[in-house]
Image (cartoon, grey):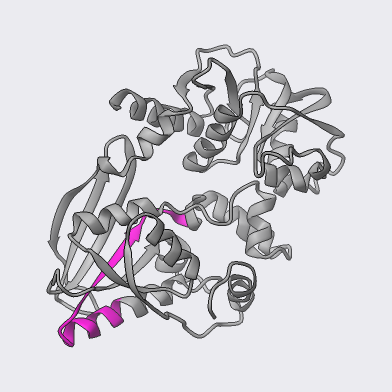
Amino acid sequence: MTGATRRVALAIDALRHGWPIRVEAEEGKAFTLLPAETGFAPGTSASRMLISAARAVTLKLANQLEAAVPEAPVLIRAAEPFDLELARAVADPALDLAYPMKGPFAAEHIDAMEPARAAMELARLAGILPAFLVDFSAAEEPQALRAADLAAWKDTAHLTIASRAHLPIAATDHAEIVAFRARDDLREHVALVIGTQDGDRAPLVRLHSECLTGDILGSLKCDCGPQLDAALRAMADEAQAGGWGVLLYLRQEGRGIGLVNKLRAYRLQDQGFDTVDANNRLGLPTEARDFPVAARMLDLLGVHAIRLMTNNPAKVRALEQVGVKVAERVPHQLPSNPHNARYLATKRDRTGHLL
C-alpha cells in the first residue's frame, strides 16, 4: 500500500510542476499524459487530448459523447496536432474569447477508461485544469502509477490524529483543536471540539470546507465566513446548555476543486455564469468534497452520532452513505447580501439546498 500512495503523491507533484505522468490499468493499457495547464516542454505536440465530459459539452461535442459511459473523460483529435498553446486554449474557458475558432474536434472511443478517469481525478487533486496532451514524445521519463493506486491513496485508514491542544476562541475559551494528517497527503484537516465531550450525547456538528476568500478575507460572494462564525457561536451556546459541538474544518477549497480553480470559476461568474455552470465550463464537478475523510475524523474523535448543521440534504445522505449516523439535520441559514444572493439562489434551485 505504501508504494501505491507514494506513486499517487509523486504523480500529483509532477502535475503541479508540469511534468508528464503515465497512468496504467491492470490489463496493461495506459496513457502517457502531459498536463495542458502546467506542462512546459517547448516544441511538444500530440495528435490527441484528454478532456472532461463537462468541458467537451462546452466545446459542442455533446453529440459525440459515449452515452453508455456517463460523465466519462473524452479523447479528442483535431485536424492538426495540439501544441501546448492550443491545448491551453482548449482547456481554459478564460481563453475562449481570445481563441474563438477552436476545432473542429472529433471524439474517439477510449479503450482504457480506468486510467482516463484516474487522470481526471489526479488533475483535480493537483488543483489544475483537467486536460492533457496524450501519447506525446516525452523527453523525460514520466512518473508512472496505476489507476488502482488512487483507491489506496484515498483510504481514510491512513488518517490519524497528529496533535491536539487547548484553543480559546472568540466564541468560547472552552475549545480544543485536533489536527489530522495522512501519509502521502499534504492536506492537514482540523477539528474544533467545543465544550465537554460526551460520548452518550450527539454533538452539534458542522462540516466546513476551507474558504480562504470567505473565512479569511471576508468575501461577500459566498456565505462561508458568516456560516463559520455562526456555527461556532451555536456550538458555544450548546456547550453552555450542557451539550457539546464539533467543527470539522476540511482542506477542500472550492468544494474540492482547489483555490486557483475556484477563482477561475469566480471569473466566469463575473461574466454571468452561475456557480454550477462556471464549474462545468472549467470541466470540473460541482461537488468534489471528500466525505469519507469527515467520517474518519468523527470516528477518531469517538463520535458515533451527530446533529448536523446544514441546509443541504445531499450532505446528510453522503455522510450516511459512509457510515455516519445523522440523528438530526439542524438548519443553518443566514441572511443573504447583494453579492451572494444569486449564489444562494443557485444552491437552492440547482443543488437542492433548503433555503
Is residue 201 or residue 340 the one in the foreground? 201
Query: Which x, y percent locates residue 312?
Result: 48, 71
- Picture quarter with the C terminus: bottom right
Q: Is residue 344 left or right of residue 65?
A: left
Query: Which x, y percent locates residue 234?
Result: 30, 82
In the rendered structure, which segment of residues is drawn in magenta? 232-253
Query: Which x, y percent locates residue 304?
Result: 23, 64
Q: Is residue 184 left or right of residue 17?
A: left
Q: Is residue 92 visible?
A: no
- Which residue appears at 38% of the width and 31% of the height? 9
Query: Which x, y percent locates residue 191?
Result: 25, 61
- Which residue appears at 55% of the width and 32% of the height? 119
Q: Is residue 140 visible?
A: yes
- Which residue appears at 68% of the width and 27% of the height? 110
Q: Quadrant of residue 331?
A: bottom left
Is residue 121 or residue 199 the one in the foreground? 199
* Numbered circles on residues, count: 0
Q: Is residue 17 above or below residue 204?
A: above
Q: Quadrant of residue 149?
A: top left
Is residue 224 or residue 303 the one in the foreground? 303
In the image, farthest residue toward the bottom: 241
- Which residue appears at 54% of the width and 28% of the height? 18
Is residue 221 or residue 243 the one in the foreground? 243
